[in-house]
Structures are given as C-alpha cells and as structure tokens.
Amino acid sequence: MVNLERPLRTDGNLGGHFVTGHIDGVGIITKWERMGQDRVLDITAPPEVMRYMVFKGSIAVDGISLTVAGVTKKGFRIWIIPHTFEVTALRERKVGDAVNLEADLIGKYVEKFVSARSKG
C-alpha cells in the first residue's frame, strides 16, 4: 500500500510540515501497540536521520507528516491518532517492517546555515 496526498496549493493552508518526498533513510518498526484509542509506534532510524530528530519536531514516515513524541539514541516514538491510523498506509504496517523516513527540512536548512556561518 502506498500513501498518496495531493500537493499543497499556493493558496492553501499548511496542515503539517514541509515534506519533499526525498528519503533520508530507512527505519524499522520495533514496537506497535495500542494506547487507548491511539497507537504508539517506535522506530529505529539511521544516524543520518537521528541527527535531525527533536522531541515534538516533525518526521515523515512513508510520506506521512507526523510529530515526534519521544527520542532515544537509536530511534524515536510517534503517537498515531485514530483518524491518521484509518486514512493512511500506517494501518498496514507491523513490527519488523521497513519504513521510509524524511527528516524535517527546516532542521536541514538550519544545520547548513549554522555550518556556513561557523566557517566564516
């Protein structure tokens, strides 16, 4: 199953974060459990993705814009509300599945800006 969304129109409202579709790495689902009506998903991620991971920041998992609910050294946690679970391809995923990850674009720009400024 593939998750598809329409592109943002120039006169539209932004309801998530900027997702370009460029994959930064592949993660593995390590935990998938129900918490009340929600679902909790733990994903291990490679260092090239983890460097941009911040609590309450954004991450795209298989193209779905989500909020980071927790960060560890090797992975992160997301909470999936019932609506997101029902209308996305996440409902088909299980422990052990690989997922495409795209780190927050703003974090990448900030890193590049700070790096350029520090080099002088």
Image (cartoon, rainbow, N blue to C red):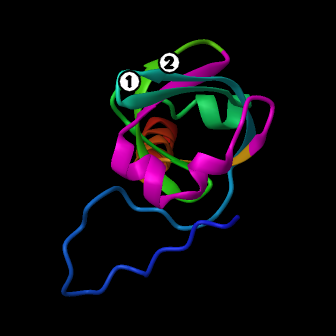
Q: What stretch is highlighted in magenta?
A: 74-98
Q: Is residue 38 left or right of residue 21?
A: left
Along the polypeptide, which appears first: circle 1 or circle 2? 1
Above or below for 112 versus 32: below
Residue 11 at least partly seen: yes
What residue sits right under mark 1 in the picture?
A: 55
Residues 70 and 25: in front is: 70
What residue sits right under mark 2 in the picture?
A: 71
Disc 2 residue type (three-letter): Val
Task: Give the CA separation, mark 1 to mark 2.
Answer: 6 Å
Residue drawn at 50 percent across, 30 percent down: 53
* In magenta segment, residue 93: yes
Number of labels in the image equals 2
Q: What element carries label 1?
A: loop
Disc 1 residue type (three-letter): Phe
Q: In which quarter of the image is the N terminus?
A: bottom right
Residue drawn at 56 percent across, 13 percent down: 72
Q: Residue furthest top?
A: 73
Residue drawn at 62 percent across, 54 percent down: 62
